[in-house]
């Protein structure tokens, strides 16, 4: 069974600085998707960035980028120029194969605080 | 496009009572998911529907939880009788279907259930 592990329950960053959130996963599949979601106090999960496992190029979305290391099964999120609005819970998620229904498996989350 | 609608937003009940949550997915989304998110943890899939059929309910406590999606559109999740450990946020999500899912899911804002 696939698992997702986020080893940092809490992280803190100074406004305008850069922070990296860690995520590791375990799978025997070769083709899959990985996601980072942001969950503010409003509770709604907001997609931050996604990565297809068959793509070697790391995904980038404005200030957000990932470091995808397929062999190491590592998928970290880097937030550059951190803003106060980035403060939230961040979840790493793995999408299982379609033959297993394509559900998302989430890590435990990392609470990010941004200091002004 | 309208998002995933959920109601109620909050619910407080006594243990052994029953409760129901409602979800209306994005129009045209064939796949609907119910996740349970206990405080401090990542969401865990309870049940997945493809149109009005169940794809995965392996993590659904069937002795007390039930869910339906009769017309392949909106869905209801019920708990009867509720236990203290059912206190959690119940998130509904939808996606286009069992495709490559390149855009992940769209989540609702969830229902926060407190069982006292």
Image (cartoon, coloured by chain):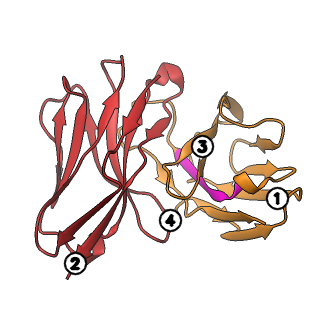
| Magenta part of the chain | B86-94
Residue A31 falls in which quadrant of the image?
A: top left
Kindly identify which numbered label has been placed on residue B5. none
Q: Residues within 10 Å of mark 1 (few under 14, many from 20)?
A: some
Residue B6 visible in rendering: yes
Residue A13 falls in which quadrant of the image?
A: bottom left
Most frequent secondary structure within the magenta stretch: strand
Q: Position of residue A46 (x, y in %)?
A: 40, 59
Measured in 3D between alpha carbons, the distance from the residue under mark 3 to the one under mark 4, in whole angstroms, is 16 Å
Kindly identify which numbered label has been placed on residue B19. 1
Measured in 3D between alpha carbons, the distance from the residue under mark 1 to the one under mark 4, in whole angstroms, is 20 Å
**Residue B2 belongs to the span the image colors magenta:** no
Q: Position of residue B55 (x, y in %)?
A: 64, 28
Q: Secondary structure at mark 2?
A: strand
Query: Which residue is the extreme one toward the bottom?
Result: A116
Q: Secondary structure at mark 1?
A: strand
Kindly identify which numbered label has been placed on residue B33. 3
Q: Are marks 4 and 2 on the same chain?
A: yes
Query: Which chain did the renderer colour orange?
Result: B
The correct choice, above or below, for A53 with respect to B73 in the image is above
The correct choice, above or below, for B106 with respect to B11 in the image is above
Of A83 and B2, nearer the camera is: A83
Quadrant location, the C terminus of chain B: bottom right
Of A94 and B98, nearer the camera is: A94
Residue at the spot 45% in from the left edge and 58% down from the top edge:
A45
Q: Chain of mark 3?
A: B
Q: Residues within 10 Å of mark 2 (few under 14, many from 20)?
A: some
Q: Chain of mark 2?
A: A
């Amino acid at each position: 069974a696939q698992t997702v592990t986020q080893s940092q329950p809490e992280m803190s960053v100074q406004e305008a600085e850069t922070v990296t959130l860690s995520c590791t996963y375990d799978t025997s599949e070769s083709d899959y998707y990985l996601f980072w979601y942001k969950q503010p106090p409003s509770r709604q999960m907001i997609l931050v960035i996604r990565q297809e496992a068959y793509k070697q190029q790391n995904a980038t979305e404005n200030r957000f980028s990932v470091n995808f290391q397929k062999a190491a099964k590592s998928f970290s999120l880097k937030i550059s120029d951190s803003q106060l609005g980035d403060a939230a819970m961040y979840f790493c998620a793995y999408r299982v194969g379609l033959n297993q229904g394509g559900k998302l498996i989430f890590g435990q989350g990392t609470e990010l605080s941004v200091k002004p | 496009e309208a998002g995933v609608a959920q109601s109620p937003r909050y619910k407080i009940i006594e243990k052994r009572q029953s409760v129901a949550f409602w979800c209306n997915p994005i129009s045209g989304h064939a796949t609907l998911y119910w996740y349970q998110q206990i405080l401090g943890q990542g969401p865990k899939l309870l049940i997945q529907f493809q149109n009005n059929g169940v794809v995965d309910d392996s993590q659904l406590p069937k002795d007390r939880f039930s869910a339906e999606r009769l017309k392949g559109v909106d869905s209801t999740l019920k708990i009867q009788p509720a236990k203290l450990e059912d206190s959690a946020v119940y998130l509904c999500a939808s996606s286009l279907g069992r495709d490559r899912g390149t855009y992940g899911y769209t989540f609702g804002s969830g229902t926060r259930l407190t069982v006292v």
